Amino acid sequence: MRHWLFKSEPSAFSWDDLWAAPRRTTNWSGVRNYQARNFLRDEIKKGDLVLFYHSSAEPTAAVGVAEVTREGYPEDPKDPTWYQVDVTAREPFTTPVTLAAMRKERALADMVLLKKGSRLSIQPVTPDEWRLIAKLGRRSRPKDALPPLTR
């Protein structure tokens, strides 16, 4: 099992949209970068955990945890160039973990998101990075959240 960060502009699709979706599930499609496509196609597996990250927002922040519930499959079966996965919302963060807050954490200094020029919409996250960001976001848990995922 691996950990990932998926970026989405809240004006296009937000955490609240995922939380309100039937079964809190949607397909994660529309990625048009070959490296991110390769992650979707080859590396992201069912059961992997995802930090849902609001990009192009004020502030930019990790806002919740989702789980991959279907592995990569073509967006268009007739043209399998672009891939998607299905994700299910598991836990909203009670405290959004902003980019500024992440930059203050020395333990996150090597995180892909914080590297200069890093623009990928899908990025790997190490287990240590995951634990720290999840801890920062889970200061207290909302009543309607599913049990916390500690993997």
Image (cartoon, rainbow, N blue to C red):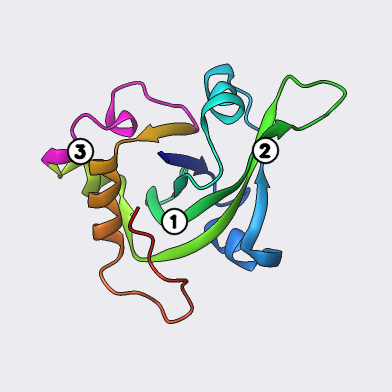
Q: Residue at x 30, y 56 (%)?
A: 134
Q: In the rendered structure, are the residues bearing label 2 and label 3 in contact, judged by CB atoms less than 8 Å apart?
A: no
Lower position in the chain sequence, tag 1 or tag 2: 2
Say which amino acid is labelled 1: Val
Tell whether 38 sits left or right of 135.
right
Count of picture labels: 3
Query: Which of the two residues, 105 or 132, is positioned nearer the viewer here?
Result: 132
Q: Secondary structure at mark 3?
A: helix
Residue at 43% from the left image edge and 39% from the top image edge = 4
Question: Which of the labelled discs sits on residue 29, or is there none?
Answer: 2
Q: Few, some or many C-alpha atoms within 10 Å of disc 2 (few <14, some 14-19, many ≥20)? A: some
Magenta range: 106-121
Mark 1 and mark 2: span between their CA atoms? 18 Å
Query: How far apart in space, not on screen, are marks 1 and 3 (Cα)?
Result: 18 Å
Quadrant of the snapshot with the N terminus:
top left
Residue type, mark 2 in image = Ser
Residue 123 sits in quarter: top left
Residue 27 in the image: state x and y as whole percent: 68, 46
The circle on residue 65 is 1
Examine the structure image and report whether residue 120 is included in the region drawn in magenta: yes
Residue, disc 3? 108
Measured as percent of width and height from the top left, residue 76 is found at 82, 29
- Numbered disc 2: secondary structure: loop
- What main secondary structure does the magenta stretch of the protein show? loop
Q: Residue at x 70, y 25 (%)?
A: 82
